[in-house]
């Protein structure tokens, strides 16, 4: 993509960070009108609605970005945002399914596991949520005390499965 395209996206994202949600939505609507089939614009436009608390409007845009072949550079974030939004609107099974698949595809992304734990808890699968959080802590908390007890914690988690 061109530098101009990226800078225009950056403007919309900055409006979101500043809490100017309606302006961000309007900005991305303009880009969407110019590039209606661009998966990146669909993703960013969905994010603008999502940030504004308008999840139901974000979901079809996120799905459109997937259908149109969003670049792999943005797929982990899209999976997280779509699944989190689905969780927020009560579509818990699909949220968990998307996050489980994303965690397998992107094991190096701890944010996916964290959001999976949230979705599992929302779905009433508290044991699975806790097990996921323990695994996340073992894999990503890099302190001397965690290293010391990692084997014990891992054994506990394995026993609970």
Image (cartoon, helix red, strand yellow):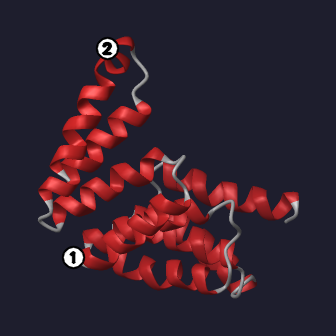
Where's residue 41, x and y in %?
A: 66, 74
Q: Quadrant of the N terminus?
A: bottom right
| One can see residue 126 in this view | yes
Query: Is 159 situated above or below 102?
Result: above
Q: Which structural element holds mark 1?
A: loop
From the image, tell me which residue sits under label 1: 90
- Outermost residue on the right side: it is 2
- Outermost residue on the top side: it is 144
Q: Which mark is residue 9?
A: none
Query: Is 148 situated above or below 40?
Result: above
For this rendering, which residue is in front, 1 or 107? 107
Where's residue 148, x and y in %?
A: 33, 15
Marks 2 and 1, the one that precedes in the sequence? 1
For this rendering, which residue is in front, 88 or 98? 98
Side (left or right) of 108 relative to 69: left
From the image, tell me which residue sits under label 2: 145
Query: Is 11 situated above or below 110?
Result: below
Side (left or right) of 30 relative to 101: right
For this rendering, which residue is in front, 131 or 71? 131
Q: Residues within 10 Å of mark 2 (few under 14, many from 20)?
A: few
Who's the residue at 24% across and 27% down the image?
152
Who's the residue at 39% across and 16% down the image?
143
């Amino acid at each position: 993509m061109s530098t101009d395209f990226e800078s225009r996206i950056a403007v919309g994202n900055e409006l979101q960070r500043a809490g100017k949600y309606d302006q961000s939505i309007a900005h991305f609507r303009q880009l969407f009108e110019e590039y209606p089939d661009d998966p990146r614009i669909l993703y960013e436009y969905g994010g603008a609605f999502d940030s504004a608390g308008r999840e139901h409007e974000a979901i079809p845009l996120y799905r459109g970005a997937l259908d149109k072949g969003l670049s792999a550079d943005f797929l982990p974030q899209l999976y997280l945002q779509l699944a989190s939004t689905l969780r927020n609107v009560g579509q818990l099974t699909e949220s968990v399914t998307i996050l489980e698949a994303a965690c397998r595809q992107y094991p190096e992304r701890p944010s996916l596991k964290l959001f999976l734990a949230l979705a599992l808890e929302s779905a009433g699968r508290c044991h699975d949520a806790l097990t996921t959080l323990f695994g996340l802590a073992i894999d990503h908390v890099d302190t001397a005390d965690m290293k010391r007890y990692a084997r014990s914690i891992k054994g506990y988690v394995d026993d609970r499965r």
